[in-house]
Amino acid sequence: MTAALLFTAFVALMLAGVPIGAALGLAGAAAIAVANADSQWFGLLAVPQNFYAGLGKYPLLAIPMFVLVGSIFDRSGVALRLVNLAVSIVGRGPGMLPLVVVAVAMFLGGISGSGPATAAAVGGVMIVAMSRAGYPAPFSAAVVGAAASIDILIPPSVAFIVYSVLVPGASVPALFAAGMVPGILAGLALIVPAVWLARRHGMGANEAHLPRPPFWKSLREASWGLAAPVLILGGMRAGWFTPTEAAVVAVFYGLFVGMVVHRTIGVRDLFPILRESGELSAVILLVVSLAGIFAFSLSTLGVIDPITRAIVGSGLGEYGVLAMLILLLIVTGMFLDGISIFLIFVPLMLPIMQHYQWDPVWFGVLLTLNVALGQFTPPMAVNLMVSSRIAGVRIEQTSRWVGWLLVAMCVVMLAVVVWPQLALWLPQRLGY
């Protein structure tokens, strides 16, 4: 009865247009009140306690800092300089600009870890360039949206930080290391259909006639951006700072690059950057804290155990259950952002993971791969929504091209399922 109320209220509120965070908090509070109808205040004193408990975790301090890093590097002109460097390396010709899009998006993922932010930064530079070279706008939007989805796999990743808070035994450094190889494989997998489609359909006919940037000048201009992931990840590996401290270091480094080196950020730009980052961080952390109420309802009202027993006893077997979870995450990824998916489903999936003794780090990478797929799967893909808006097309127009990119990502996901060492080899080598 209470479990049905919890999920029914959540779905009803979502369908009514209530924001995801408020829907989680209100549904959880309603379930607590119904379950404690005979208690003083209906047990609702647990609501503020769990609101704070959901937020009062040290690793979450890294989230607003990495969001701020993304905003700073977006305005610093690093994306344009990385694009020029990539073009100077691979040259001009049919299919080369889609390759550049994926490569630059992967690299920016090593700075901010936010898919929509990368879609905006790369799309703002590359969609105009691809249009000038003769690529159709829906194809450009599809490639940018798919490439930006890799960012939640390549460290630093906001999704991995949230997962580490929810799952004991999965540390942030281990997850960061585990996402590296699958993230690179996902990027390489996206390059293959993107280049093949461009050449098969004769896109980019004007690309070969555009000037090629000089290599050494492009390398010199992009060197400050190239050093950012080295500083962030290398500093964590060397033990100079924790992931949270690394985010703070990255903020000051980004400000130095934008204000002193490239001089693309002025003092007047700081307030819009801080306001934009503060608003986005507030939304993320508010969802996290309100999800704490929902998670408390799941655990204390006895909702998780019956669901776990029903799934484990369904007769599907280990890989059948895994396939069902993957399908569920891909479908929900079409409608919800990655952080919301983790907050809703990880508490439900944790007992299943423990039952089958799946490695928590490997499982986190697999979940994140599924979320990445959902971020560019129509009809409500968040990354595709950003890139389509920049390209001036409807999301439906990108479906013709997105399907091929989804197949490429699914191949990587299947490889991670079959060979878990693709995710676990690097953290084991680094001693995490």
Image (cartoon, rainbow, N blue to C red):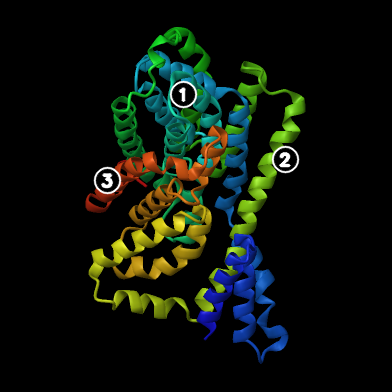
Q: Nearer the viewer, mark 3 or mark 1?
A: 1
Name the residue carrying label 3: 411
Which quadrant of the figure has residue 20?
Answer: bottom right
Q: Which of 150 and 396 is in front in this view?
A: 396
Foreground label between 3 and 2 = 3
Q: Position of residue 295 (x, y in %)?
A: 54, 69
Q: Earlier in the sequence, mark 3 or mark 2?
A: 2
| Residue sitting at x 56%, y 29% | 124
Q: Which of marks 2 and 1 is nearer the N terminus?
A: 1
Real-space CA distance between mark 3 and mark 1, rounded to the nearest whole angstrom:
27 Å
C-beta proximity under 8 Å, tags 3 and 2: no
Q: Are marks 2 and 1 in contact (CB under 8 Å)?
A: no
- Name the residue tied to disc 1: 130
Q: How far apart are marks 2 and 1 (CA)?
A: 31 Å
Residue farthest to the bottom? Answer: 38
Q: Name the residue rendered at 58%, 71% in the picture.
A: 12
Which three-letter amino acid code belongs to the residue tagged 3? Val
User: Mark 2 highlights which residue?
Assistant: 275
Give the class, few, some or many, for how many residues have Cα within 10 Å of label 3's Cα (few <14, many ≥20): some
